[in-house]
Amino acid sequence: MHGIKNSTLDMRGPALSRRGFLGGSAVLASGLIVPQSALAADEPVKGGNLRLGLGGGSTTDSIKPGSYNDSAMISVAHALFNGLVEWDADGKISPELALDWQPKDSAKTWIVSLRKGIPFSNGKTFDADDAIYSINMHRGKDSKSGAVGALKEITDVKKIDANTLEFTLDSPDADFPYVLTDFNVLMVPNGHTDWANPIGTGAFVLEKFTPGVSISMKATGHYWKPGRGHVDHVDITIINDATARLNALISGQVDAINRVEPQAVALLEKAPNLKIVRAPGGWHAVMAMEIDKAPYDNPNLRLALKYAVDREQILKSLFSGYGTLGNDHPIPRSDPYFNTELAQRPHDPDKAKFYFKKAGLTDPAITLQVSDAAFNGAVNMGTLFQASTGNAGIKVNIKKEPADGFWSNVWLKGPFVASYWGGRAAATQMFTSAYKSKANWNETHWDNPKFDGLLAMAQATTDEAKRKTYLWDMQSMLSNEGGAVIPVFRDWLDGSSKKVGGHTPHGGYDMDNGMICEKAWLRA
Amino acid sequence: MTLFVASLLIFAGTEWLPGDLASAILQNNATPSNLAALRAQLGLDRPIAQRYLEWLNHALHFDFGTSLANGQVVIAEVAPRLENTLFLAAYAAIIAVPLAVGLGLLAAIWQGSFLDRIINLLTLTVISVPEYFLAYILIHYLTVSLGWFPSLANVNTVTTLAQRLYLTFLPMLTLVMVITAHMMRMTRASILSIMASPYIEMAYLKGLPTWRIVIAHALPNALGPIVNVIAINLAYLIVGVVLVENVFVYPGLGQLMVDAVTKHDVPVVQACGLIFAVAFILLNLVADVVAIISNPRLRYRAA
């Protein structure tokens, strides 16, 4: 596997800044995607019915903000509602319903001013009370929201005037505006609870919602965001079966789909009227060891496993090369604070043997718990891991867990479990979610005062040079000492008809980070 | 009685699933605090026996409660899905049953002929192929290559009957192929086993033509097993088509149940399970009644 000279696997390419990320991805994917510049050249067209076939929908779906955890509802929600801050396709953030944000007290307090005169679909104008209600929906002890972790740092949100908010945080966070891009944190009218009849400021209003089956929405016709909201109507069909989704696209029954199987990309490219929308992002696979439990408390064993895993093989066989190699820390190459000087850890069975011997464990009884409930391919990743560690003389058992109950019985419970992480808009958010000592989802039990200190300092300063030093140090700490084996980052792969314009690769989530409905247009 | 046992099994089965609804809904967004809040709201913290009795009592009054996952009334959620399932089952059955019995008779009349062999070969092939594979083959040829029929059977409440028949053509065809093969082989085998009996020989000696012997003399006596296999296949059309529904994205009861199982939405799973049990029991009852009516011996013993 060392001999792969595929440009998509070549790790020595120039570092990508967020700005250079789009261009870079086009180079990486040379010939695989229609160059976005060509698409951007033609003007958006008004009108038409956009038909989407989306995987990641369920009969238990709801329109209530806070309940979204998969693709279909994320796309629906962003068609109906707006957030305060938008995470752009180029990785930057821009004002959405917020107009501006200013830190105070070294970023412990944030003053957020809101856009004026934006109407909800019921005619009411959006103001500070609506924003406070929408934020507080996710906060508090009884919150069932998926954003409860992201918003934990907010201790108070106050109204200063009708269009200004003041957020108080429990500790300084220079990246707080990134927190507000969370896909569950969307703005609804103050006091609204009737989620069967949602009211939002988005480009569309709901027509019909059958959870897990179909969603149709029609344009309001007077969307406030310039250059967005082109189509008249959106029809979403939930298609959870990957083959059925692909069939629907190929036979022209839908205009765009999410989650194209990597193995099917070549097939899709053969079709003259279809294109792949490929976005390198923050999604990564993790094999998480709890570093306070034997034998994973042995740093040499952790290093041995990190050298033993064959990352290129995993990337190639699981994702057909549509992704990049991981370096045992959760920050993707597309992040401006990606540590470019940290050498990519190679697959090196000799070094693995060396560290395994140094660990001095005769029979460490390593068992990796896997389930395809974590992500499609997790079991295969375990098998590949077992084979490559076997080559280094380290015996690893694979225990296949039932998909049912995986998230409640296995994840965060077992000492060595394969799972995944979706990307976060800011590096500090990723560290706060999973590697800060007190994080709810600290799956590796990483508890390092120096690391916590660096995180706090990075959050407390807006000095770019300092932030870079701190965040780079944190990445090398995790890579060398941490409990997570992070073999690969996976690209988002959407497919769409060539008559769809504006379907942009976005590293945040599939379907343009859920913004497809308001960004896409249909060529006649 | 059977239904009661079925209800007990359904309830027990859903209770023993590992994990619970709250964590299935929240997935990796779960924190101990939002988990506990959700569990309390869903009433998952009460004893099992109490929840079973309440459920049984309500189920007897056709009240399956509200979905734990999204708060909708279960009946409202299940009814349109059941309608879709029954529609597809009826569509397939109306075509498959006459076709299967007809082909079975033809194969029996011309036993050993070229036609018989062709029919046998085709039906054996279809039986040996998993139904979703058959579905993909049909999609490949009829949708992707020829573009005659849609692969998405995304019907809804405003679809007209004509549209509905068109949209569900491929799933119907898949099901027809699967059950026709089974029923046809059973028809042929039952007829042939009767054809070996002495009274058929007698009919031949009287100089009757084969087709007449098969239709007038053999068929009535072979009806029992044929009706039974038809009942089993009709039951399959209602309870066993989840794979086909999945391939064609057809919003039937099977998909709803699978979805509910993965999310641990117990009331929905239980309602679906009960409906399936009722369908199975009813169809078998009908088959038995028909068998009794068609067989004078059974009829007199019963009287």
Image (cartoon, coloured by chain):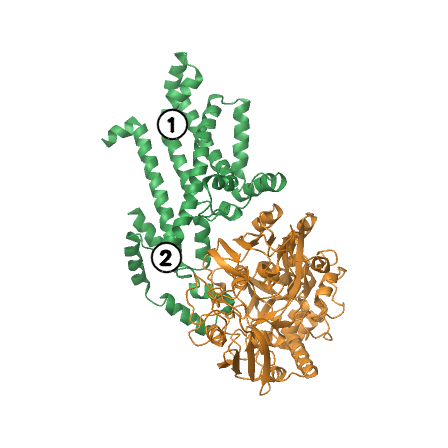
Percent from the top left, x then y, of residue A58? 48, 57
Percent from the top left, x then y, of residue A435? 58, 76
Q: Chain of mark 1?
A: B
**How far is the residue under mark 1 from the one under mark 2?**
46 Å
Q: Which mark is residue B73?
A: 2
Q: Colour of chain B?
A: green
Quick check: A515 above or below B124? below
Percent from the top left, x then y, of residue B244? 50, 45
Residues A229 and A20: in front is A229
Identify the amino acid type marked 1: Ala
Q: Residues within 10 Å of mark 2 (few under 14, many from 20)?
A: some
Q: Which chain is orange?
A: A
Q: Which mark is in front, 1 or 2?
A: 2
The residue that disc 1 covers is B222
**Tag 1, which secondary structure?**
helix
Residues B246 and B120: in front is B246
